[in-house]
Image: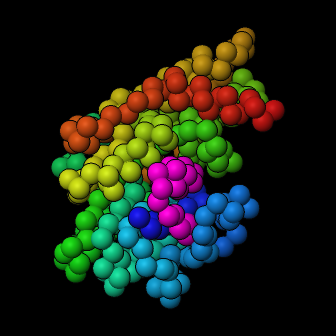
Amino acid sequence: MKILVTGGAGFIGGYLAKSLKSKGHTVILCDLPGKFSEVAKKEYQCIECDVSDKIQVFKLPLVDAVYHLAAQSGTASAIKDLNKDLNWNAIGTLNICQYVIQNKIKLFCFTSSMAVYGNAEGAEETNLTKPTSPYGMSKLCAENYVNYVKSKSPLTRICIFRIFNCYGPGQDTKNLTQGLASIFMQQLNKSNTIEVTGSLERQRDLIYIDDVVSALELFIENHFVEGTYNLCTNEAVSISKLIDVAYETSGLNYDMLNKVNIGGPAEDPFMATGDNKKLVSLNWKPKTSLREGLLECWKTIRSKK
């Protein structure tokens, strides 16, 4: 198929594009100007496009399937610029939805977030959505626009994946407000002090990038995949425990490991864990344990020294 991946220069988008191409699909990437690497430009057709601009979006080529990943990501970033968060997540998604409707695209997949649940333990897809952050609110608004597509384009198959804390090698660690696992590994590589933006007892559900990609691809491989799914491991891990496992995996031998709470946004939920049984019922399951995933992250970080 010919597949468009918005946010194709991003962490998940890059992994997804590589996997789709390896399976024989023609992959077109879309992202903001200046985002694409020279390597990406050689590997794919790359289109510079701000999805919050309807005129630019409507110039995108006709494709068989759309993976809409382009978004502002993270609670802290959203709080810094609420208008940008709304424009990229809600208005940007509305523009992509209108593009899908106008072109009667057959397959449309949207990556949402655990943030739509707000503070929730073991959240199921049927849980009430009570986002505590502007980021979660904009992603929930985007979900509603995606579901609206069905009423205008009944033949379009739609899927929404609510992704929990995704991590893996190559994740950007410059932003200390997202990418928990990779950020902690990067800090360990530099010193014995780990700075945490929030309570060490917060609970999260971490899922490895390869498992995220395998679930996303399930959408185009299985005609029964439709509707909304949690994309998580079903395993709750405290931030403190995550740091301990990361340290153990690294093999480092610091005399003392310091975990310092430097303060985080009040909108960041204490509990953000999910239930994945709906997705597991489709013969999907996460294959990478936390230790295995962290080890791959560590290998990548150490190889750059």
Task: Please tell me whether residue 80 belongs to the stretch shown in magenta.
Answer: no
Q: Residue at x 48, y 80 (%)?
A: 61
Q: Is 59 in front, or is 163?
A: 59
Evaluate whether residue 263 shows in this view: no
Quarter of image, res 45: bottom right
Taking 295 as reference, is 248 above or below it? above
Question: Can you say which quadrant of the picture contains the C terminus?
Answer: top right
Q: Position of residue 62 (x, y in %)?
A: 43, 79
Task: Please tell me whether residue 24 belongs to the stretch shown in magenta.
Answer: yes
Taking 9 as reference, is 231 above or below it? above
Question: Can you say which quadrant of the picture contains the N terminus?
Answer: bottom left
Quarter of image, res 184: top right
Question: Taking 275 as reference, is 58 left or right?
Answer: right
Taking 72 as reference, is 294 above or below it? above
Q: Is 168 in front, or is 128?
A: 168
Q: Residue at x 36, y 39 (%)?
A: 232
Extent of the magenta region: 11-31
Q: Residue at x 68, y 65 (%)?
A: 41
Q: Position of residue 220 (x, y in %)?
A: 33, 56
Taking 72 as reference, is 206 above or below it? above
Q: Residue furthest front?
A: 24
Question: Taking 159 as reference, is 202 left or right?
Answer: right
Evaluate whether residue 257 shows in this view: yes
Q: Position of residue 89 (x, y in %)?
A: 45, 68
